[in-house]
Image (cartoon, rainbow, N blue to C red):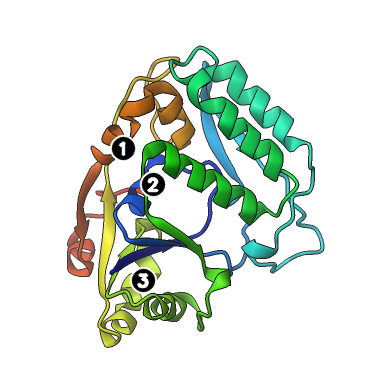
Amino acid sequence: MRIAISQPAYLPWLGYFDLIDQVDTFVLLDNVQFEKQSWQHRNRIKTPTGFQWLTVPVQFRGHFGQKIVEVQIRDREFFASHIKGVELNYRRAPFFEQYFPGIAELIRIHSRSRLVELTQHLIEEFCAVLDIRTKILRASDLNGIGRRSELLVSLCRLLNANSYLSPLGSAVYLSADIGVFEAAKIEVGFQHYEHPSYRQMFPPFLSHASVLDLILNEGPNSLAILRSGRRLPLSPQELVSSAPGAIIE
């Protein structure tokens, strides 16, 4: 039983879905502190002049220290500008008409929900489009205990997982805490993903856009392209021996 755990993200990039695709169960880590101006509530689409941010406005003032699961959307009409931004830049994309109306409707419907509900529904929709069938759960619905690595190990135990695949963004603190996993007899690997190129509007190609960019440009080919960036996970020992800067994300 292999799982991955990562904070929910708005319109995530390709590597996020590669992580989901490699495991049996994916846990949205929504019971940790929310970070303003993070991937938790914003991401990028491609325009003729480069990247454009799409940011979900959230209630932050007076809510310092709130957990992701507690975050409320501040402006319930934000969806109109996000939908318009995608339409302006992708309406000539080959698969815009096939996929975006359904995604736009999800953004509209859940613009009146909490942030985590919006992001989870979009992640599940993208998985359906990509034909990724991994089970997705929320940490806030489980009874995990502890902080940082202790919380991750607790979630692994609750799900009877003996293998944990970590995003590289957690490598610094996780490597220092690897003994917590070893004591629990949980094997740890680190995702190794090299961003693939694909057909894209407005050359030159720019990597690390939202997965929306891939889907609207490549449609049914998206999953094969996404998987083409996958490399074998790195062991903790391999991660330590890797040259600084050799692996990104």
Per the image, the residue denoted by label 1 is 226
Among numbered discs 3 and 1, the one appearing first in the sequence: 3
- Residue at image position (62%, 55%) is 116
- Disc 1 marks a residue whose amino acid type is Leu
Q: Residues within 10 Å of mark 3 (few under 14, many from 20)?
A: many
Q: Residues within 10 Å of mark 2 (few under 14, many from 20)?
A: some
- Disc 2 marks a residue whose amino acid type is Phe
- What x and y, as percent, mark residue 31? 58, 69
The residues bearing labels 2 and 3 have C-alpha atoms spaced at a distance of 21 Å
Mark carried by residue 17? 2
Q: What SS does tag 1 mark?
A: helix
Q: Quadrant of residue 243?
A: bottom left
- Residue at image position (34%, 62%) is 166
Pair 3/1: label in front: 1
- What x and y, as percent, mark residue 125? 50, 42
Up-down: is 24 above or below 207? below
- Residue at image position (18%, 69%) is 237
The residues bearing labels 3 and 1 have C-alpha atoms spaced at a distance of 26 Å
The residues bearing labels 2 and 1 have C-alpha atoms spaced at a distance of 8 Å
Labelled pair 2, 3 in contact (Cβ < 8 Å): no
* Relative side of 114 to 24, left or right: right
Mark carried by residue 174? 3
Q: What SS does tag 3 mark?
A: helix
Foreground residue, 23 or 84?
Answer: 23
Labelled pair 2, 1 in contact (Cβ < 8 Å): yes
- Disc 3 marks a residue whose amino acid type is Leu
